[in-house]
Amino acid sequence: MHLITRLIALICIFSSIQSFATESLKINLRQADSIFLEKNYLLLASSMNIEAQKALILQSKLYPNPTLSVSFVAYDPENNKALHIGATGQKTAEIEQLFLLGGKRKAEIEMAKTNTGIAEIEFQKLVREIKFKLYSNLFSIGQQKKLIGIYDNQLTLLDKLLESNTLQAQKGNLPVKDLVRLKGAYLKLNNNRAELIKSYLDTQSELQTILRSTKEIVFDFSETDISKYINSTGLGILIDEMHKNHPELLLLEKDKALAEQYLNYQKKLAIPDLSVSANYDQQSSAFRNEIGAGISLNLPLWNRNQGNIKYGAFKLKASEYQFKALENELQSKLKNAFSFYSQTVNEYQKAKKLYNNDFEDTLIGMNDNFKKRNVSIIEFIDFFESYNDALTELSRIKTQLVNCAEELNLLTGKDIY
């Protein structure tokens, strides 16, 4: 009953995969890049933030609007007139313009430009983070798809062996324990396939979100695409590229520049602004229909913006410390990632030498010899499981190579691999 239950579960999983695969999107790396740059919602939102910051540059360039003030008599009790604003009535008008002194407007423009630069770097940072997930997941499903296909072929082979050996066991020509051993190998392989399918579907979900698609993503790649990730670039060059290109370091540099601009702006705010006005008074001044002019200026006696200036100075110092802390952290991460990458390259090169057509030929030979009873069930199952372990390990190494190289690209902020 247990075997029957597992077989039913396998059929259900296989059916779900078949229905899932009815619509597919076959892509290579170049096509994947194009799709995610065009359709990813997070990138679209980030690009809108850039445009929003550019709008603030436009806003910072605008001059303050003039202020127009008009007053008139609502009710004249001496002449018993409402709205007495004619030739014998009273009205005043004043227009006032504020002039920002000390380079405040220029400072606001510079801060707006820096904020736009920050938005652009954040966009590039997001692109790199999503690209890392995209490439890693593509190669993962590529390897998983291959393994699933191999497992399917092996399950078909074991099905046939189980059918023929069950008949032999019923006739008494095969020990029942050997048949049980063969069933155990089948169930183990079926378990491995079910776990692989679960991982495959999880990765598909992530890819469909990145590429904004409901279709099964089928990755078109070759062994050359994987071997291209082997690069002889040294650690010193990677560290230099990281200092020049890593988005988080560039962001902290922009933050530092913004902190300097903010401090400079707060110092400029201590400089009083000038207001110039012109006014007209019909009756109540020294002369009828008087036209006057005036200026006004804040006197910085008590509030000279001392607190904000001090705040800006501390924020600038904090940004300098944050940059140094992140620089040390990223350099340490890069060294460790490079060490792991170098180890993975060695594993990959050794695995390529060890795995060749002999594996496939030996599997076919073992299968034929087992059918002819030239090898025992124990020898056949041991080889069968060792063969699958080798395939799984080779798939792991290939996926790990891609992930390690893409992580180095992410840490350096440049496509080196």
Image (spheres, rainbow, N blue to C red):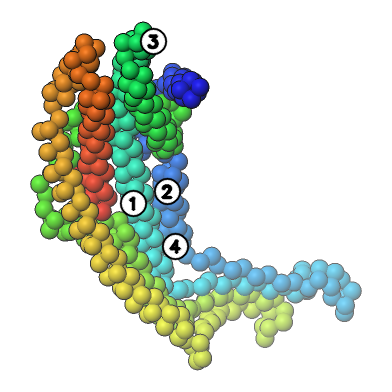
Disc marking residue 46: 2
Residue drawn at (34%, 48%) of the image:
129
Amino acid type of the residue tagged 3 in the rendering: Gln
Q: Position of residue 361 (x, y in %)?
A: 15, 19
Q: CA distance from mark 2 to mark 4?
A: 22 Å
Query: Which secondary structure, mark 1?
Result: helix
The answer to whether any part of residue 27 appears in the image is no
Q: Position of residue 229 (x, y in %)?
A: 18, 40
Residue 16 vs residue 357, the one in the foreground: 357
Residue occupied by mark 1: 125
In the rendered view, tell whether residue 61 sits above or below residue 306. above
Query: Which secondary structure, mark 3?
Result: helix
Residue drawn at (14%, 56%) of the image:
235
**Foreground label between 2 and 4:** 2
Amino acid type of the residue tagged 4 in the rendering: Ser
Disc marking residue 69: none
Disc marking residue 60: 4
Residue drawn at (45%, 73%) of the image:
100
Residue drawn at (20%, 51%) of the image:
340
Disc marking residue 170: 3
Mark 4 vs mark 3: which is more N-terminal? Answer: 4
